[in-house]
């Protein structure tokens, strides 16, 4: 493959890259104008835009890697919508630990996102699209709002956009601090003004999403890809990447113990060791002990396992992990793995939305056991119990995949780094573990009565 | 606390401890200023339902009064035609609505995995110690500082990441802590 030139991050770091003026000077909004003009002559139709995106092989960049064009085709045709509008939601609730690519796109090149949303809105017959941005990105929301104001002023949004007869509005909606709102149905609930509780599927959002209307939720990076696909064509996009199922440019967020952590753009499927070289290798010339390839929800791999893995959806899946949001967390040979896993468990214990019992109860239990292990109070049976409890939380036990994410670090780290966990337990002050007979168990209420809480 | 696991988890990020049940009143007149009112009216045109404007309206309320008191919940509920109980349920689900007053500088230290690998827990601990031994979520006596532990701020390449009010600060390692705090004063 010839030298790769960044696409999505091409304008990052350029002077005044957020402004409409510079965006247009760099060829921005050409596709939006092209498609709108073409819609008058019949050269461009919504179906054609969808077909181009489908042909590009673009897969969702938010984590699941679902083909974007196919997702769009799940929206029912106009006559079957019962007069309901279609909504496009841009998922900018980037909260997965280790992930920071969308922040860069939002803060450095907001018009790129807007153009992607405009093109997707055209394809989906959307009149009002929303950007759900996480509450913590205060400045990101301001930047997006400023970009939207510029777009309205330039007639790129609003009623009768550029004389095409089409109307389109975009609104920024700020979250308020909840990881689960990145899950698409929780995001929908949150947009409706509720607690972010994921919904049972089906019905899928494409059929009944926000305000019971057909809804498509796409990640920030995915929508940026749409813009470039419409700029340069499906074949160009397909020409980048490892194979037909893993196409396009990709943003990788590399953090942890590397010399130059940051967002790196590379063709989909770059081998891990090449990515590591881009980041200047591991700090102080140390070895890679473990890597989480796709954000904290992805199973952990050892340094040896991941070194030659192509960093794309299928490549990482073949290595028994997942590309997820491509948040690559590198841990050097000095890392205390049980402590790192306990840290991740703490995140999930706090962020469980509380709807489903296996997750609401299971996540804090995992944390409790991991904490006592690293605090020198671990019991011999704890490792088995961690695996056992994890086994009862995932694989369809809950409404959404949060529980599966929460158990991934536990289930992947214990087999790989068992001796580290065992070393903690060996030093423990309370290594024995006997299950008390039922008649020896004091009911919780009795304990409370004894403390005088009810008397 | 989102949802609320029944098994207690110590040090919960995001919430001042006194805020669990919410304080009643912020002692200010509960009516939006003209500017806030204008924002609210504009908001309502952007959604097909009034309820959808709840999160942004709570943001306006927090900017107006600094935090969300039980009275503010009643006010927002009345403005959007919702029940107070429902609004309170929403407020308690999200970590960024303060249910108690916070200091002038709300110091939010990220301790998620990438920051953890770069020593964020020590930074969180040391930061509280330097500000007079504050507990997580506690506000200093002079009302200047509140230190809370938060989750991934999407600044993992700049770990340990700290956010003060809405502003991002990067690479706040132990050796930079003094300079960082001095800048806040």
Image (tube, coloured by chain):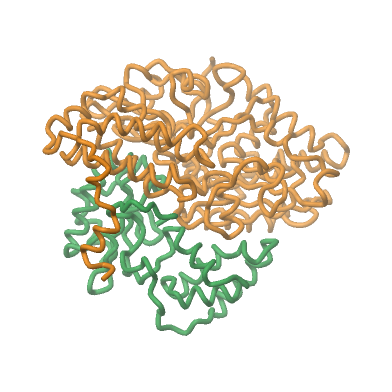
Give the image location of residue A344, x and y in percent. 34, 40
- Tell me: residue A197, above or below residue A59: below
- In terms of depth relative to the viewer, which is nearer, A226 or A337? A337
Rendered shade, chain B:
green
Q: Is residue A107 visible?
A: no
A223 lies left or right of A276:
right
Q: Residue at x 30, y 33 (%)?
A: A385
B134 over A36 or under it: above or below? below
**Left or right of residue A431, residue A177 in this image:** right
In depth, the one of A278 and A416 nearer the eye is A416
A287 in relation to B76, above or below: above
**Image quadrant of residue B142?**
bottom left
Count of labels shown? 0
Residue drawn at the location 45% of the way across and 50% of the way down? A354
Residue at (68, 46) in percent of width and height: A215
- Looking at the image, is A136 positioned above or below residue A424? below
Q: Position of residue A180 (x, y in %)?
A: 49, 47
Would residue A290 appear left or right of B46 to someone viewing this image? left
Quarter of the figure that contains the C terminus of chain A: bottom left
Residue A37 image position (x, y, % from top left)? 81, 42
Quadrant of the image containing the N terminus of chain A = top right
Furthest residue in direction front, as rendered: A439
Q: What is the x, y in percent for residue A276?
A: 36, 24
Colour chain A appears in? orange
Is residue A266 visible from the viewing direction of this image?
A: yes
Instruction: State which quadrant residue A235 falls in.
Output: top right
């Amino acid at each position: 493959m010839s030298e790769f030139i960044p696409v999505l991050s091409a304008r990052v770091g350029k002077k005044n890259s957020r402004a409409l003026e510079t965006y247009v000077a760099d060829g921005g909004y050409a596709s939006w104008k092209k498609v709108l003009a073409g819609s008058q002559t019949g050269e461009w139709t919504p179906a054609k835009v969808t077909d181009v995106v489908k042909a590009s092989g673009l897969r969702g960049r938010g984590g699941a890697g679902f083909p974007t064009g196919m997702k769009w085709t799940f929206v029912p045709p106009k006559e079957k919508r019962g007069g309901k509008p279609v909504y496009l939601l841009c998922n900018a609730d980037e909260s997965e630990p280790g992930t920071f690519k969308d922040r860069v796109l939002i803060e450095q090149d907001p018009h790129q996102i807007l153009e992607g949303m405009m093109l997707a809105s055209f394809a989906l017959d959307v009149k009002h699209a929303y950007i759900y941005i996480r509450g913590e990105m205060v400045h990101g929301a301001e930047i997006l709002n400023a970009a939207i104001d510029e777009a309205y002023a330039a007639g790129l949004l609003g009623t009768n956009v550029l004389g095409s007869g089409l109307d389109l509005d975009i609104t920024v909606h700020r979250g308020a601090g909840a990881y689960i709102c990145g899950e698409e149905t929780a995001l929908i609930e949150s947009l409706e003004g509720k607690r972010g509780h994921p919904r049972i599927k089906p019905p899928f959002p494409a059929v009944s999403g926000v305000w019971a209307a057909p809804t498509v939720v796409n990640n920030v990076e995915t929508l940026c890809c749409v813009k470039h696909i419409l700029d340069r064509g499906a074949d160009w996009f397909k020409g980048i990447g490892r194979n037909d199922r893993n196409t396009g440019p990709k943003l990788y967020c590399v953090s942890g113990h590397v010399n130059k952590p940051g967002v790196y753009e590379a063709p989909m499927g770059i081998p891990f060791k090449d990515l590591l070289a881009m980041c200047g290798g591991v700090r102080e010339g140390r070895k890679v002990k473990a890597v989480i390839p796709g954000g904290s929800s992805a199973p952990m791999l050892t340094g040896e396992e991941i070194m030659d893995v192509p960093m794309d959806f299928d490549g990482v899946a073949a290595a028994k992990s997942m590309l997820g949001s491509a948040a690559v967390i590198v841990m050097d040979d000095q890392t205390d793995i049980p402590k790192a896993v306990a840290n991740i468990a703490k995140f999930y214990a706090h962020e469980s939305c509380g709807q489903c019992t296996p997750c609401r109860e299971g996540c804090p239990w995992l944390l409790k056991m991991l904490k006592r292990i690293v605090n020198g109070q671990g019991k011999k049976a704890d490792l088995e119990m961690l695996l056992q409890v994890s086994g009862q939380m995932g694989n369809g036990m809950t409404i959404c995949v949060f529980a599966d994410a929460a158990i991934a670090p536990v289930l992947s780290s214990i087999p790989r780094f068992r001796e580290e966990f065992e070393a903690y337990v060996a030093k423990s002050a309370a290594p024995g573990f006997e299950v008390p007979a039922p008649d020896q168990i004091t009911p919780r209420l009795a304990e409370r009565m004894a403390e005088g809480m009810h008397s | 606390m989102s949802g609320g696991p029944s098994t207690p988890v110590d040090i919960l990020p995001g919430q001042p401890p006194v805020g669990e049940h919410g304080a009643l009143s912020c002692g200010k007149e509960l009516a939006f200023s003209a500017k806030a009112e204008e924002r609210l009216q504009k908001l309502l045109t952007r959604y097909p339902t009034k309820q959808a404007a709840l999160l942004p309206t709570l943001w306006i309320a927090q900017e107006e009064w600094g935090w969300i008191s039980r009275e503010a919940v009643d006010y927002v509920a009345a403005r959007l035609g919702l029940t107070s109980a429902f609004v309170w349920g929403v407020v308690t689900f999200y970590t960024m609505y303060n249910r108690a007053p916070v200091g002038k500088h709300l110091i939010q230290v990220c301790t998620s995995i990438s920051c953890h690998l770069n020593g964020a827990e020590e930074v969180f601990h040391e930061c509280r110690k330097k500000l007079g031994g504050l507990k997580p979520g506690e506000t200093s006596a002079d009302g200047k500082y509140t230190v809370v532990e938060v989750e991934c701020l999407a600044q993992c390449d700049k770990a340990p990441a700290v956010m003060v009010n809405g502003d991002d600060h990067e690479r706040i390692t132990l050796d930079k802590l003094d300079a960082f705090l001095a800048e806040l004063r």
